[in-house]
Image: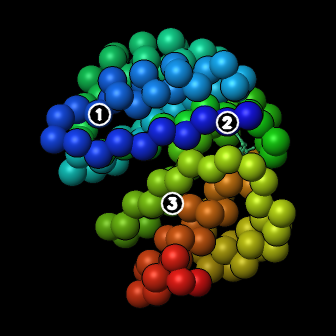
Amino acid sequence: MCGIVGAAARRNVVPILIDGLRKLEYRGYDSAGIAILNGSMTRVRAVGRVAELDARAREKGADAPVGIAHTRWATHGGVTEGNAHPHISSQGDLDISVVHNGIIENHEALRERLRNLGYEFQSQTDTEVVAHLVHSLVRAGRDPFDA
Ligand code: GLU
């Protein structure tokens, strides 16, 4: 079962995100990742243990006051770094990053619709449709929580 952590603070939240994921390791997972916002968005992902994600985040000097984090238990798409969350939709000056627990049952219909709007998919996950869907709604000036 996946784990989700989010944090916003006046200091670097990367240690909070990583510690949060460590506390959720008992639930089981196959890969892990974070997306953080510090002017621009940075993503770090790793297959395997949270310790590996932590090492990569340190290597990258990841440091930001806002972020989301995820441990994945794959349901759609193999266990790869490219399928690990967060998934990002990036076009123009709008970056949307999402983590998700569970299954998007209508992901194929949504994928088709979003492809027709010009979105390109980078992963095999059902989750990625949510990133592009939210991006498309925000870009159109709509409230994604009211769609
Ligand atoms: N269905 C999503 C995936 O395969 C989320 C799985 C999960 O709950 O971790 O990426």
- Vertical arrangement, residue 78 with respect to residue 114, above or below: above
Q: CA distance from mark 3 to mark 2?
A: 21 Å
The image quadrant that residue 65 belongs to is top left
Q: Amino acid at mark 3?
A: Ser
Residue drawn at the location 48% of the way across and 39% of the way down:
5
For label 1, the residue is 13
Residue drawn at the location 57% of the way across and 66% of the way down:
132
Q: Quadrant of the C terminus?
A: bottom right
- Vertical arrangement, residue 12 with respect to residue 57, above or below: below
In the image: residue 98, left or right of residue 116: left
Q: Amino acid at mark 2?
A: Cys
Q: Earlier in the sequence, mark 1 or mark 3?
A: 1
Q: What is the x, y in percent for residue 106?
A: 82, 69
- Front: mark 3 or 2: 2
Q: Nearer the viewer, residue 14 or 97?
A: 14
In the image: residue 120, left or right of residue 106: left
Q: What is the x, y in percent for residue 11?
A: 17, 35
Residue drawn at the location 72% of the way across and 78% of the way down:
113
Would the CB of label 2 be found within 8 Å of ligand 1?
yes
Residue 11: tell me if it is visible: yes
For label 2, the residue is 2
For label 3, the residue is 89
Q: Amino acid at mark 1?
A: Val
Looking at the image, the residue that sits furthest to the bottom is 141
Considering the numbered disc 2 on the image, is that residue within a helix, a strand or a loop?
Answer: loop
Ligand 1 - quadrant of the structure image: top right
